Image: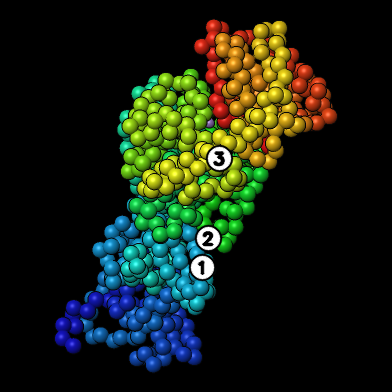
Amino acid sequence: MDGDTGIIVYRLGAACDVGDVEEGKIYSGKVQGFAPFGSFVLLNDRVKGLIHKSNVKTRHNEQDSVLVRVRTIRPNGNIDLEEVTPSLYHTEVVLKKTAGVQLRDLGKYIGRMVRVEGEVAQIKQTGGPTIFTLVDGNGTVNAAAFIEAGVRAYPEVQLGDIVSIHGEVMQRNSQLQVEVSGLAVLQGEEADRVRGAIDAALTERATPVERPFLVESPVLEKLRVPMLHVAAALRKAVFLGQPILVRHHADADGICAAVAIEQAVVSLIRENGGEHDADFFLFKRSPSKAPFYEIEDITRDLDFALKDFVRYGQKLPLILLADNGSTEEDIPSLRMAAVYGLTVLVVDHHHPDTVVDPYLAGHVNPYHVGGDYGITTGMLGTEIARMVNPAVEGRILHLPAVSAVGDRSEAPERGKYLALVKDGYSEDHCKEIALALDYNQFWLRFNDGRELVKDLLDLSAHPARHAKLLAHLVEGANAAIADQLAASMPHVSPRVLENGVHLFLLDVELHAHKFTFPPPGKTSGEVHDRLIQQHPGTPVVTIGFGPDFAVLRSRGVLMNIPRMVRELRDEIRGGGVSGGGHLVVGSIKFVEGMREMVMEALIAKIARAPLAGPTGTSPSAPADTPKPL
Ligand code: MN
């Protein structure tokens, strides 16, 4: 062939791996050893190929220098060589390139061989190839490596490794995929360089764009920094291909917060080029019966996460607790999460205990900045969702209003969020949605009801179905509540305490339907609502109790239920007292045999509680009472 002087022989640099070797090119190498079928040749200390005996041109001794052309690089990294003997050539050194093709640019390379670098975010063994999900600072792609159907390729690769992959960019359906020809795990400096670049790019990309809040609110302004922090953590998890689990209190407020974030995260996952079903395995929303992270919840979450890790090669999730997570009662679960190094974020408006903070990577709570539960989790969650992904804003504007009426916020923000959506959603409409969410969740139990809840919240672009479903559920809920009250109200026993509080007691175990809607907490709340209407201008406390629990509702009394619970726990030996909740609304558990004593001590404390001053300025009662049953 003419132009022999133009032949380039490449010398592979020491840092190079199989990903730097290209088919068709000529390399210098050293004979390393022999097999019956040919000669092994090292292209550098770590890249080895084989010259099949049919392609050997000269006689070989160990350590001989040879020139070889790369015929093929097999998916398992094996390199087939043929010996060449050009008379004229010049040598060029192949240095490890600083970076391969950026993942966001892969679309320009369809049908071509590329080298890409990134972190392994998931390793999934299919019946065919092994799928490595790769992320870099600005994109994600699946790389398919095949040795044999159903057999794990590159078993040395671990989740979280930094790898360099050489392969062809293919289009599968609408998805880009790299067919792996070579894959090397980067170590030491090379890995540090790639990891550093990914981290810097991701941190920048994860930073939310700052925009004004939907309503004017001094409390929200003071929470802006921790909210941005939570939004950035969620964005970063999406870009890293890390699953996100939102655990939320199973009431209208908790659902609104979690669904707002679900909308933002799921559409960000899709924008980021996730597979069509990525939003199902990369995002989970799970309701918690109590407004705290119960041991039962963390146990289930860890069980699933660890199985997904083993079975689907998935990273452990980032956990966001919404409308729970702020109190001492969360500690056992947070400690359990810490055993596995899980990152936990909290967005809550329950009165926080500082003991949770060492376990949290972020904590948004209006009490930290002088606000209170009137800033609902639905407001916080919706504003954070806008930071995560502004594109979903138009769909979720009404969620803060629904959460505000659901949790009976009396903060000025309630009216502002209602005003924001008044043309589409009247206050009554919002109340109906909140009631229907509670009713629906009662029957959903532990399930998230993702699609049903979307219809209920009018997020599924079927307004007629939303209206029908809403009307049906509201009718069912109201009928059930009317039934319950008809049975319960005649059994309410009144008492006037020495501080002037009108106390009403109801045994919800004996005088209410069990195992149906409304459950004891909600039944007590509904009873309380009727009683405060019947006693305008009077301080009122309603206690619905069962064999081993009591649910408290109040108006016009300055109570601190978490403190009362702590005192009762210390004062009543063998009472087994626990519980908590909001300051003026909450629940208490105790052992059945000590009910009399605990109830009397509790009532004595209520009788000493100061009143809230002239009626009308009384502290209101949020609706999301802990549900003990
Ligand atoms: Mn709430």
Mark number, residue 27:
none
Height in image: 424 above or below 88? above
- Quarter of the image holding residue 414? top left
Q: Is mark 2 within 8 Å of ligand 1?
A: no
At x 51% / y 25%, what residue is drawn?
A: 408
Q: Are marks 1 and 2 in contact (CB under 8 Å)?
A: yes
- Quadrant the N terminus occupies: bottom left
Asked whether the viewer can see residue 509, the reply is yes
Question: Can you give x and y, in whole percent of width and height, for residue 92 in the image?
Answer: 26, 71
Residue occupied by mark 3 = 476
| Numbered disc 3: secondary structure | helix
C-alpha separation, residue under disc 1 versus residue under disc 2: 8 Å
Which badge, 1 or 2, is on the more N-terminal residue? 1
Mark number, residue 313:
2
Which residue type carries mark 3? Gly
What colouring method underlies this structural image?
rainbow
Front-most of residues 498 and 463: 463
Height in image: 569 above or below 191? above
Q: Are marks 1 and 3 in contact (CB under 8 Å)?
A: no
Residue occupied by mark 1 = 125
Which badge, 1 or 3, is on the more N-terminal residue? 1
- In the image, 26: left or right of 442? left
Question: Can you give x and y, in whole percent of width and height, for residue 230 in the image?
Answer: 45, 37
- Quarter of the image holding residue 141? bottom left
What crowding class fits label 1: few (fewer than 14 Cα within 10 Å), some (14-19), or many (20 or more)? many
